[in-house]
Image (cartoon, grey):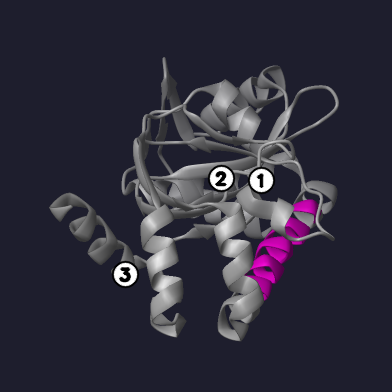
């Protein structure tokens, strides 16, 4: 009992709608809240047939991606501390059919509000329904931006943007990442990414090592992504 009280107290500080809930709704969430600690590489949600529920990241990093008919992955967005994911509970929104996979990019602690529980509270609470719609609209805006990048931005610019984002996230210019992982994020083929990275290395932008890429010239990468 004591452990559960600590968990719920911590959840209160992370869940942005907690103070908008009434006493009964808070109790329902507290009684049904799921806590998970997942290792890097764990698949948390897998497509439309898997209605996991609303995810709230306590610590760590998750990747939301889609698969093409050929089996290629492309990252839609990343989730960090205090971020919420609704696409893992898209079954509660009848007009949305969006097959995404959610994977732990790092060891991650998270909470899950079961889909049916969240759906019932959405029906009862206007603030929860409004916030949910706003968050879903924001996520789809991210997806539309990504589609524009894929359609209109050349691969070298997208790779440059990816490196700049990763160095910002990790806080270092030494990225422990494989060519395959970059290809999965960008929806490309490993061989294509390898050729691009060798070109970057020849231009003095990066240094390639086994399982590691060192960013040598961030300023030129910034210029490249803006050009």
Report whether residue 99 is seen.
yes
The disc, 3 or 2, on the residue closer to the chain's N-terminal end is 3
Near mark 1 (Cα within 10 A), the count class, few <14, some 14-19 or many ≥20, is some
The x and y percentages for residue 104 are: 46, 36
**Inter-mark Cα distance, 3 to 2:** 34 Å
Disc 3 designates what residue? 12
The x and y percentages for residue 115 are: 60, 54
Near mark 3 (Cα within 10 A), the count class, few <14, some 14-19 or many ≥20, is some
Q: Residue, x 79% and y 52% (percent of image)?
A: 147
Report whether residue 16 is seen.
no
The x and y percentages for residue 195 are: 66, 21
| Secondary element at image label 1 | helix
Magenta residue span? 132-147
**Inter-mark Cα distance, 1 to 2:** 6 Å
Disc 1 designates what residue? 158
> Marks 3 and 2: which is nearer the front?
3
Question: Which of the pair 2/217 is nearer the observer?
Answer: 2
Left or right of residue 5, residue 36 in this image = right
Left or right of residue 143, residue 82 in this image = left
Instruction: Name the dominant secondary structure of the magenta segment.
Output: helix
Circles 3 and 2: CB atoms closer than 8 Å: no
97 shown above or below 19: above
| Secondary element at image label 3 | helix
The x and y percentages for residue 152 are: 83, 52
The disc, 3 or 1, on the residue closer to the chain's N-terminal end is 3
Question: Which of the pair 110/147 is nearer the observer?
Answer: 110
Q: Which mark is residue 41?
A: none
Q: Residue, x 58% and y 31% (percent of image)?
A: 182
Q: Quadrant of residue 86?
A: bottom right
């Amino acid at each position: 009992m004591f452990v559960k009280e600590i968990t719920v107290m911590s959840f209160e500080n992370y869940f942005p709608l907690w103070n908008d809930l009434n006493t009964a709704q808070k109790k329902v969430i507290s009684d049904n809240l799921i806590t998970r600690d997942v290792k890097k590489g764990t698949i948390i949600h897998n497509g439309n047939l898997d209605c996991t529920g609303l995810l709230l990241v306590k610590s760590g990093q998750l990747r939301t991606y889609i698969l093409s008919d050929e089996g290629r992955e492309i990252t839609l967005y990343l989730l960090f501390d205090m971020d919420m994911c609704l696409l893992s509970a898209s079954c509660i929104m009848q007009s949305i059919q969006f097959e995404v996979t959610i994977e732990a990019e790092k060891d991650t602690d998270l909470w899950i509000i079961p889909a049916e529980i969240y759906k019932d509270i959405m029906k009862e609470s206007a603030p929860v329904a409004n916030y949910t719609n706003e968050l879903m609209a924001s996520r789809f805006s991210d997806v539309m931006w990504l589609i524009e990048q894929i359609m209109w931005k050349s691969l070298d610019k997208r790779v440059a943007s990816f490196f700049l984002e990763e160095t910002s996230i990790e806080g270092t210019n030494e990225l422990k990442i494989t060519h395959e992982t970059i290809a999965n994020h960008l929806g490309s083929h490993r061989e294509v990414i390898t050729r691009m990275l060798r070109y970057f290395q020849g231009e003095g932008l990066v240094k390639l090592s086994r399982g590691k890429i060192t960013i040598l010239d961030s300023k030129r990468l910034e210029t490249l992504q803006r050009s």
